[in-house]
Image: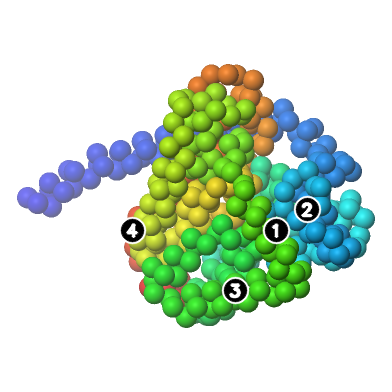
Amino acid sequence: MERESDTKGDPPKLGRRKVFRWLFGAVVLAVFGLSFGMGVAFTDITLGRLADDSMRTHADFDTFWQSAEAVWAGDEAYDTGARLDNLNPPLWTLAISPLGLIEPILAYRIFAALSAAVMFGYLAWMAAETRLGGGWASLSTALLIVSSPFLASIVLGQIYAFLALGLVAAWVLDRRGKPIASGVALGITIAVKPSLLPIMLWQISRKRWDSLFATLVTGASVTLAAALSLGFGATFDWLRLLRDATVNPYWDNASLPAAAARLFTENSYAEMVADLPWTIPAAYIIGAALAALTAWRLRRDPSLGFWAMVAASLLVSPISWHNYLMLLAPGILLLISRGHILPALLLLGLQTIPPQWPLVWMNDETIFASLMLTLYLYILLIHWWSFLPSRKLRNHEASHLADSGFREE
């Protein structure tokens, strides 16, 4: 009787799952339709910015280049008169200082080419490590090439491709049973972008003390070496910039504190829902809680949990530009390799929404428009939720990793 009852109960459950998959598929198609429509409407703008010779268009790289030039001229590396403040640490300024010897537009072209090559490299590395088939690897790479984060990052001359490479290196080395080497890679990455510090919870929650120690020692060492090379004055100038920086409510800032500033304080970017400035510290608390939840859940699946931890770090940071989604692109390939095709396609579709999304809403002074202008936070939250482990590895996934020589808890 029990078996008969179980058998009778299976079809409705399977039917509900089928309906859910169809609905999920419809959402994915709608997202791709939106992306395609906006892409057609704004293609000229994107391509025009890529070809522009004005350093004002490549604003982030212009900031880096002026700091690099100041290094060779013996001037203040963090007080160059650039349009944007350089919030990256002395290590990054030292790393790109050779480009300060080249004319700015040529230096930008070289940097853009290197960024593109690095992105292809870490995606290929990720595809090889996860044994992703050529068809899926080609499709996902093609979509990520036309994604908003990649194109905008190349246009502005940002550093995210190099950060993503460091994260992929830390992830791969850990899976291959090389925790110290993984810790070194993570230490260098965090030293370049200290807002990624919460990722160390990935090591702490699994008691990978040797990897954590390697991260701390490496990060401290390269930071000290950069400070000695540029002078401690440059380091103090950078720290002062960080101290004086406030939460930026600009549309592209996808973090929780930024969304709180945009929706609940007076600002020039969106109509506030209500005047509730206390929501900014509350957003930091919520972000910290999400990071703690991620650290607790990631032990169920450390490989996938790593990318959830990266997303949680972006959520809690004061500044997480939409282009930071480049750091999460490798995790999408992992989802595909696990057979989670629809969630991965949804993330790829969300990443391909053009950067001109705010242009549709910026002149609409309504609360609804403000909520629409906060789309990038929703996209970041969806990435975090998609990577958050909800269960332990399935048997076939664990077997696949074992056959590949990977070590998992």
Mark 4–mark 1 Cα distance, whole angstroms, equals 46 Å
Q: Are there few (<14), some (14-19), or many (20+) residues within 10 Å of tag 4? A: few
Residue 6 visible in image: yes
Mark 1, residue position: 237
Mark 2, residue position: 79
Mark 4–mark 2 Cα distance, whole angstroms, equals 49 Å
Q: Are there few (<14), some (14-19), or many (20+) residues within 10 Å of tag 3? A: some
Marks 1,2: beta carbons within 8 A: yes
Q: Residue at x 54, y 33 (%)?
A: 262
Q: Is residue 384 left or right of residue 238?
A: left
N-terminal-most mark, 4 or 2: 2
Work out whether residue 93 or residue 355 is closer to the camera in this orientation and state it: 93
Residue 136 visible in image: no
Q: Where's the C terminus, which quadrant? A: bottom left
Mark 4, residue position: 391
Label 2 vs label 3, nearer the camera: 2
N-terminal-most mark, 2 or 3: 2
SS class, disc 4: loop
Q: Are there few (<14), some (14-19), or many (20+) residues within 10 Å of tag 1? A: some
Q: Amino acid at mark 4?
A: Arg
Mark 2–mark 3 Cα distance, whole angstroms, equals 24 Å
Work out whether residue 57 or residue 391 is closer to the camera in this orientation and state it: 57
N-terminal-most mark, 4 or 1: 1
Q: Amino acid at mark 2?
A: Asp
